Amino acid sequence: MSIWVWGVALAVYGLFLAWYVNWRGPVSKAEVETLMTALEAATHENDRNDMSIMRTFLETDDGREFFMVNLVKLAPGKVPDPITGELKSSREVMDGYTKVFFPAIFARASHPAIMARKVGGYFDAWGTEPDPSWSAMGYMRYRSRRDIAILVTDPKFGGAHDFKFAAMPNTFSFPTQPMLLALISPRVWVGLVVALVAAFAQIAVLLAAA
């Protein structure tokens, strides 16, 4: 009688995996050209990004998820709001970007894996530039390289990047794939949560039938 409970649970978890996993495989050569054209059009007004690096990243796509390391320095004191010119804290100005950014990445099964603020200076550092006084770091999970390229060209971002540029005088980002990750993947904990809910639902059904 409670088979339907587990059927629903499997269907829910299947829908989650359909959304969370990149089933389309690596970016094709034709897609690379289409995406690069869109990227160059979307970023032509600034010189903050090297398009050759993005092209290589897309051309060497392995179809797997990746994690972007983001080191961020927020501007000290007050900075002008890009729209109103009103002086605000850099965190307040940054909100103008994040309120657009986070819904957009969540829609494409991407999300923060770690977000942390800096609490000290460099410990091990040699052969590197001086510490620019980073404020925080983020470790962001992206479903695929295709997704990040599409996100960058999303017209919804429009002027949202102006808030990021105003709030962050320095940033440093590069993509990674974990060799060892202590965090539990949503593939695991979502499955466990669904199974737990299904188990409680089955118990409730059996008690109601008793």
Image: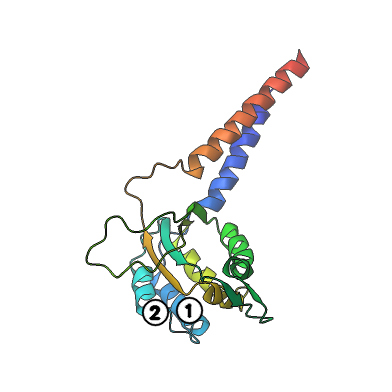
Name the residue carrying label 1.
Answer: 39
Between residue 196 and residue 120, name the one nearer to us.
120
For the point 26% across and 60% down, which residue is it? 125
Report the residue that reaches farthest toward the bottom. 45
Report the residue that reaches farthest toward the left. 127
Is residue 26 in view from this perspective? yes
Residue density around tag 2, few if under 14, some if 14–19, many if 20 or more, within 10 Å: some
For the point 36% across and 64% down, which residue is it? 61
2 or 1: tag closer to the N-terminus: 1
Q: Is residue 77 left or right of residue 134?
A: right
Is residue 145 in view from this perspective? no
What amino acid is found at the position of numbered circle 1 in the picture?
Leu
Give the tally of numbered discs. Answer: 2
Task: Name the spot of residue 79 as percent of width and height, x first.
Answer: 58, 76
Q: Quadrant of the N terminus?
A: top right
Q: Secondary structure at mark 2?
A: helix
Task: Name the spot of residue 144 as percent of width and height, x first.
Answer: 45, 60
Task: Name the spot of residue 94 as percent of width and height, x first.
Answer: 59, 68
User: Real-space Cα distance between discs 2 and 1?
Assistant: 8 Å
Report the residue that reaches farthest toward the front. 77
For the point 48% across and 79% down, which residue is it? 39
Quarter holding residue 123:
bottom left
Q: Image height check: is 26 above or below 40?
A: above
Q: Quadrant of the C terminus?
A: top right
Quarter holding residue 30:
bottom left
Q: Which mark is residue 7?
A: none
What amino acid is found at the position of numbered circle 2 in the picture?
Met
Q: Which mark is residue 51?
A: 2
Task: Name the spot of residue 126 as percent of width and height, x first.
Answer: 23, 63
Q: State if disc 1 and disc 2 touch (CB < 8 Å).
A: yes
Q: Secondary structure at mark 1?
A: helix
Residue density around tag 1, few if under 14, some if 14–19, many if 20 or more, within 10 Å: many
